[in-house]
Amino acid sequence: MASLETEVLVIGGGSTGAGVVRDAAMRGLKTVLVERRDLADGTTGRYHGLLHSGGRYAVKDQEAARECVVENAILRRIASDCIEDTGGLFVCTPWDDAAFGDDFVEGCRATGVPVEEIAAAEARRREPRLHPEISRAFTVPDAALDPWKLVWSCARSAQEHGAQILLYHRVVELERNGQRVSGAVVHNELTGEEVQIHADVVVNAAGAWAPEIAQLAGCRVAVVPGKGIMIAMNHRLVHTVLNRCKLPADGDILVPIRTVCIIGTTDMRVVHPDELEVTQPEVDQMLDEGEKLVPGFRESRALRVWIGARPLFSPEEVAETREVSRSHALLDHRERDGVEGFVTITGGKTTTFRLMAEATVDAVCAQLGVERPCRTHEEPMPGSEGGHFYELGSRLRALEPVPESEQIICECELITRRRLEDAMARRRTANLDDLRRTLRLGMGPCQGGFCIYRATGILHAVEQLDHRAANAALLSFLQERWKGVHPILYGDQLRQARLDDWIFQGLLGVQHLPA
Amino acid sequence: MTHDTIVIGAGLAGLTAGLRLADEGQRVLVIAEGIGSTHLAPATIDVLGFYDGEVESPAEAFPRFADAHPAHPYARLSAELIAASIEWFKARFPVFGYRGGLDKNFLLPTALGTAKPSSVVPETMAQGDLSAGGRFVFVGLGLKDFYPAYLAENLGHVALAGSTVSARAAELAPPLGAEADVGSLGFARRFEQRAFREAVVRELASRVEPDERVGFPSVLGVRNVGEVWRELEARLERPVFEVATLPPSVTGIRLFEAMTAALRQAGGRIAIGSPVVGAETGNGRVEGVVAQAAARPTPYRARSFVLASGGVAAGGIHVDSYGKIREAVFDLALAGLPAANGRPPFLPTYLEEQPLDRVGVPVDDRLRPVGADGRPRYENLYAAGATLAGAVPWQEASGNGLSLATGYAAAAAILERAS
């Protein structure tokens, strides 16, 4: 069995794990991150992409709101390339109590969320599709945050500081040496090989999967997965993040991000984060709530639906943890369970991932007996050095100077052949979904109807796959896509799906590929 | 002006019905929201390719197939009529040199390297037939919709009864100037230029083996059907064929151009860009349809009507966000509906047959849409093509065969009634 030596081993490649590996590497600790699938394949990649201003928590959870205020400003500085500065609006629709607006403003003032009430007419001028009968509107510095770009930027930054990132490496065992966790055995899901990783401290950043990892060390962590549904709508129905001005509830956020806008979400406790099913009532709930913000929402085209599993820790757990905030939980198992070299970080939200990482690495340093200050809030991540936010038209602008000088493989998301080939060469993945997350390949209206056959042909050439591997990549992409579209097939997206049936089954005959 | 027949939809079914009737002297209007499926699908006439595995002979499979699928449009048609539609089509468009028939399917390579059974194919595609085995070379031009190395590798592993196929790729770098993103139609237009053809032949001639058949993506010219193909065959001294590629389909565009030209020549009218949004009906008859043309609803009257507006893909059948399923023009009764109300409960596995696959308009033996009582809803309304219930053409490999046969049959029913 191959083996590795490191100071810190981070388990989990969501925003939390990526934040921890960057923070630890920047403090000069030798760090390895392992992720059972791809970066941001879990909860982080399945959220709506809202960079919170804090407004959502201003009344109900003021400590969380204060954290958001601080972290929102920091991320705008260090991760500008992952952010579109859309701004946010809280609006009182006919279904909301306009008087709550006063509580909202008071909460924002108390927590430092920059807020300004504007005339309802002005809000409708800014967002013409907004419900015509909104009574009040408030501006806040919400923004759109690209979760894949964020996590990859963190990972790249960590690598530049010497960290090692192992994708598709699943933890099968945590090694206990007496009362100390001394490392892990990880299984390479692609090659089947096992690797032994010796570490001084192991950080469990597995989010909703944290209980399973903790159990490997003989510790009990009571995290319950809370499922949240999201639907991406074709087009940007709005260009500003829209929130209903009321206590947080289901389907009250609409986030414009990249070429789509995403409505979310729900919160329902489930048994296991790998077993999440979209139900029709949940879909209808989102569509009906969307209708209250943007009339005609149901006639718009729904592109894709998915579910994320929030890590929610149970209240009795809060009581016995070294609580940093109500919004996340840092469990130092040395104090809690008498197990040395093992820390669990869970709960929280992507907006505050950096803060969570800072607290975690502080605890890691304490275990290692070293004192090194956090610097993650000071140094911009790769790609964000210029301090520019991305914009909706940035890909188009890059292609415009010399039209037709490059092949465009994914027309919906304007992905050129060179960009795709570079990503294939860099990632060396035989999984088209990895490329989807990396480049937004196939995320547009046709959901890969035109680009995925092309991408498979290119993958076959660039990575010199044999036909079996290429066919498996194609079929697995089609199945994953179906999973995300079949619960929301109606209207124009059903027409699109049927056209895609004609292309893949009628024209190409994917169902007759050699086994 | 009153027409004899108004055909709604300009895909293969609508154009076939319209042309058949115009040929017989009827005043015909083909009215459509947009260009039909011709631009999406190859011009092969796939009659029945898969039923209990690969179908070798549609003629032999028909009786069994119709027995097993009583709700299928083929169960409404006689084998003679299907054969007659094909003979009519082959004779009506000699320029394509259509080959084949119902006795034996061709087995054509797809752009992915699978084998697809097809009954009647244009001569530019016929040499791709895999059923006798042989050696094939597939030519890459840098077209982003065609990956010959991937195709060839798959084809080498396709199991064929009693024959072996060997396949390889030859990548060319034809002169495209500064334009890197040339699509199928762009290549087709370039192939119409002598200099481009010369460059391709020069680069390819020394690289093909004496016993190989040469496959190109289906981009060998869009006008002057067959000319580019014939010249390549002569110059390469090898059998040459086209392989169907992703939309836009150049072979389908050729067919659309030929059919619409023939229709106009026969005195028919075509109005594309005029979505039909409603109908005027009374006394069990359709009196007229209302099209949303030139910004205001315009009525069009006729003695007979053919609904060939397509299925779910084309918008002939619409499903809203509550799962309400509706035929878009006449609100006709539908068959093949999912059992439950609400959005169709699609199954989680992509390649399973899905609940909405067979939805469509049920018809009587004269292809007149029927109500729940099994009787024609309107005495002078006929339906053809993908609008019809009971087929899963993208799995059966039956798309253009169904459209041709039912378009032909609807016209035959109208002519019979008129006489």
Image (cartoon, rainbow, N blue to C red):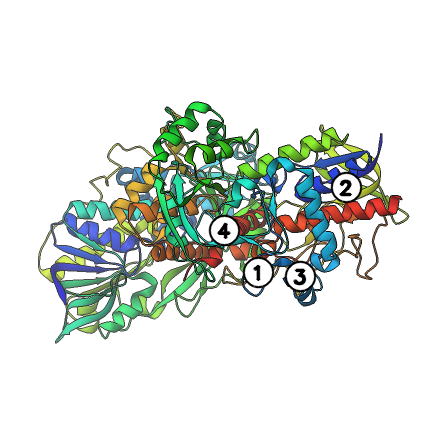
Q: Position of residue B139 (x, y in %)?
A: 39, 40
Q: Position of residue B270 (x, y in %)?
A: 72, 32
SS type, badge 2: strand
Going by the numbered disc 4, the residue's amino acid type is Phe
Mark-to-mark CA distance, 3 and 2: 36 Å
Going by the numbered disc 2, the residue's amino acid type is Gly
Q: Nearer the viewer, mark 3 or mark 2?
A: 3
Going by the numbered disc 1, the residue's amino acid type is Val
Residue under pointer 3: B62
Residue under pointer 2: B278
SS type, badge 3: helix
Asked whether the residues under the numbered discs 3 and 2 touch, taking CB atoms below 8 Å apart as contact, a structural biologist would say no
Going by the numbered disc 3, the residue's amino acid type is Phe
Q: Quadrant of the N terminus of chain B?
A: top right
- Residue A359 drawn above or below residue A54: below
Residue density around tag 3, few if under 14, some if 14–19, many if 20 or more, within 10 Å: many
SS type, badge 4: helix
The verdict on a common chain for dots 3 and 2 is yes
Which disc, if any, is residue B55?
A: 1
Residue under pointer 4: A504
Q: Which circle's residue, 3 or 2, is located before the other in the chain?
A: 3
Based on the displayed image, in which of its 4 quarters is residue A385 positioned? top left
Residue A512 falls left or right of residue B405: left
Q: Quadrant of the C terminus of chain B?
A: top right
